[in-house]
Image (tube, rainbow, N blue to C red):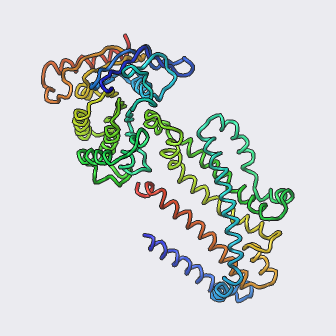
């Protein structure tokens, strides 16, 4: 069941009774076991698109399928990681991690074992009884990742998950994300405004234009590879995406 | 930590008594008896005379508070969560909220008599508005992003309530009760001077009429301890349920 792809068909969404078009005729598909990065200038509707896929924006036109079924938060497991990590300050780290599982299924011994091993591997096991407010941004983001991966979701959606972190923590957390993802591959859509992040984490990179349309879809040969930053092809691709985003920003 | 709090309370209480002691000594009139005599009286008559009155007052406060929460919380929740509900009910709340509730006492007594229910209703009227407004504003202030991870999990309203609404509103809710409680106790005192033979209000006014100043002061101290007990209880509940706030 998990080997199905995510298909977005002609999705449009407008605010204020159709006056403001946030995204327009978006169509693409993401095959199973792929991280797809959506990048674009600010105001291009990246986050709106992600919220639409997540089932948060409900009044959209078009169709979203996961496999043969229409995607809906009720019939699929969707993990959503917002920019502020989406942790609840009144719940301990452990309770925060378990929220997804509690809502979607039942907690059993296997889940607890799995949670403990994820927490160990993320270095947050010792904080499990603390509250998110007592942790640093990087630690909070790791808690958020633990929640997303413990859920064993059908689809993982991340809205600029690393943008609030400082440069060193960001790189570290990106690596943690990628190693977790490689162990539990699932369709992932990650929104970012950072070209380097897109090149490191995106197998597919979708560039959105300012008017909420798809500007270009790129295949990224440098996925999961940080060593190539001096490679000429890498530098070219990076320059190309930058240029695309600039053009897309003007939507010319 | 709780030991330190207890010590600081004892120091404050002793301080008040020392000031009182000197005032009593300087003026040396029957109207201001020495705190030592008052405490002696309190100890002597607490179980024989005051306890039953304190019990009545406490039960009335708890009943009024309970009613205010049972009705006010869901109302505030509905107004904060459903915009339509708020549009409909807000004018009603704002038109009635500024009325000093004590001025409704004659009407309440006319309609309900001077019995228990009238007294409880007065306490209810004072607390319920605070609860409604605190809960409504608390819910309105929750950023909508807070709900996103839950929405994408297909969460039910019950999930929203358990994971977000209840804990997010709780500190505000408890503060509202704390604020309303001070007014509620003073209004309770007032209502207990009518149509009852029980309650701290009755006891204090009765002692006053009997020109028994020692008992009157003892009653005032007992009433303030009831207030202290209630505030302590609210603080304790907040300490247990809002642990996450303390450590931020």
**Quadrant of the image for the N terminus of chain A?**
top left
**Residue B18 in which image quadrant:** bottom right
Q: Where residue B90 sits: x, y (%)?
A: 69, 41
**Above-or-below relation of A70 to A87:** above
Horizontal side, residue B7 vs residue A238: left or right: right
Q: Answer yes or no: is residue A162 visible.
A: yes
Asked whether B184 or A58 is in front, the reply is A58
Residue drawn 68% across the image and 73% down it:
B55
Residue drawn 55% across the image and 67% down it:
B232
Q: Where residue A33 sits: x, y (%)?
A: 27, 26
Asked whether B213 or A132 is in front, the reply is A132
Farthest residue, direction right: B110
Horizontal side, residue A3 vs residue B103: left or right: left
Asked whether A29 or B131 is in front, the reply is A29
Q: Where residue A45 sits: x, y (%)?
A: 42, 22
**Above-or-below relation of A7 to A50:** above
**Above-or-below relation of A58 to B193:** above
Farthest residue, direction top: A252
Q: Answer yes or no: is residue A192 visible.
A: no
Please state the total of marks drawn on the protein image: 0
Residue drawn 75% across the image and 48% down it:
B96
Residue drawn 57% across the image and 19% down it:
A17
Q: Where residue A196 sits: x, y (%)?
A: 24, 27
**Residue A104 in which image quadrant:** top left
**Quadrant of the image for the C terminus of chain A?**
top left
Horizontal side, residue B222 vs residue A60: left or right: right
């Amino acid at each position: 069941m998990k080997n199905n792809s995510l298909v977005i068909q002609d999705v449009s969404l407008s605010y204020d009774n159709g006056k403001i078009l946030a995204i327009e005729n978006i169509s693409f598909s993401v095959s199973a076991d792929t991280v797809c990065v959506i990048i674009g200038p600010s105001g291009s509707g990246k986050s709106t698109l992600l919220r639409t896929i997540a089932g948060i924006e409900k009044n959209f036109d078009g169709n979203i399928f996961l496999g043969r079924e229409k995607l809906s938060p009720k019939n699929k497991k969707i993990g959503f990681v917002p920019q502020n990590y989406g942790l609840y300050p009144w719940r301990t780290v452990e309770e925060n991690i378990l929220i997804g599982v509690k809502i979607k299924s039942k907690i059993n011994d296997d889940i607890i074992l799995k949670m403990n091993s994820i927490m160990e591997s993320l270095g947050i096991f010792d904080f499990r009884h603390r509250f998110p407010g007592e942790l640093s941004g990087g630690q909070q983001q790791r808690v958020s990742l633990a929640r997303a991966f413990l859920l064993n979701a059908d689809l993982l959606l991340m809205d600029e998950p690393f943008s609030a972190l400082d440069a060193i923590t960001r790189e570290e957390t990106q690596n943690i994300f990628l190693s977790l993802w490689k162990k539990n591959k699932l369709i992932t859509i990650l929104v970012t405004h950072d070209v380097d992040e897109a090149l490191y984490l995106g197998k597919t990179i979708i560039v959105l234009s300012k008017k909420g349309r798809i500007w270009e879809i790129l295949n990224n040969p440098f996925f999961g590879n940080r060593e190539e930053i001096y490679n000429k092809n890498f530098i070219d691709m990076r320059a190309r995406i930058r240029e695309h985003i600039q053009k897309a920003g003007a939507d010319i | 930590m709780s030991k330190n709090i207890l010590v600081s309370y004892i120091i404050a209480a002793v301080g008040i008594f020392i000031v009182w002691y000197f005032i009593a000594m300087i003026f040396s009139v029957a109207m201001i008896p020495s705190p030592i005599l008052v405490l002696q009286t309190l100890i002597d008559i607490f179980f024989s005379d005051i306890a039953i009155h304190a019990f009545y007052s406490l039960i009335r406060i708890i009943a009024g508070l309970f009613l205010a929460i049972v009705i006010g919380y869901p109302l505030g929740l509905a107004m904060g969560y459903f915009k339509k509900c708020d549009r409909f009910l807000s004018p009603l709340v704002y038109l009635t909220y500024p009325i000093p509730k004590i001025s409704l006492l004659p009407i309440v007594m006319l309609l309900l008599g001077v019995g228990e229910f009238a007294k409880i209703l007065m306490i209810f009227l004072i607390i319920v508005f605070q609860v409604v407004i605190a809960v409504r504003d608390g819910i309105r202030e929750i950023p909508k992003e807070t709900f996103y991870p839950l929405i994408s999990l297909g969460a039910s309203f019950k999930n929203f309530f358990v994971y977000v609404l209840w804990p997010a509103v709780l500190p505000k809710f408890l503060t509202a009760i704390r604020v309303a409680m001070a007014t509620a106790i003073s209004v309770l005192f007032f209502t207990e001077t009518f149509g009852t033979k029980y309650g701290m209000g009755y006891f204090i006014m009765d002692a006053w009429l009997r020109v028994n100043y020692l008992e009157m002061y003892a009653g005032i101290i007992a009433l303030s301890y009831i207030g202290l007990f209630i505030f302590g209880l609210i603080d304790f509940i907040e300490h247990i349920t809002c642990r996450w706030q303390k450590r931020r």
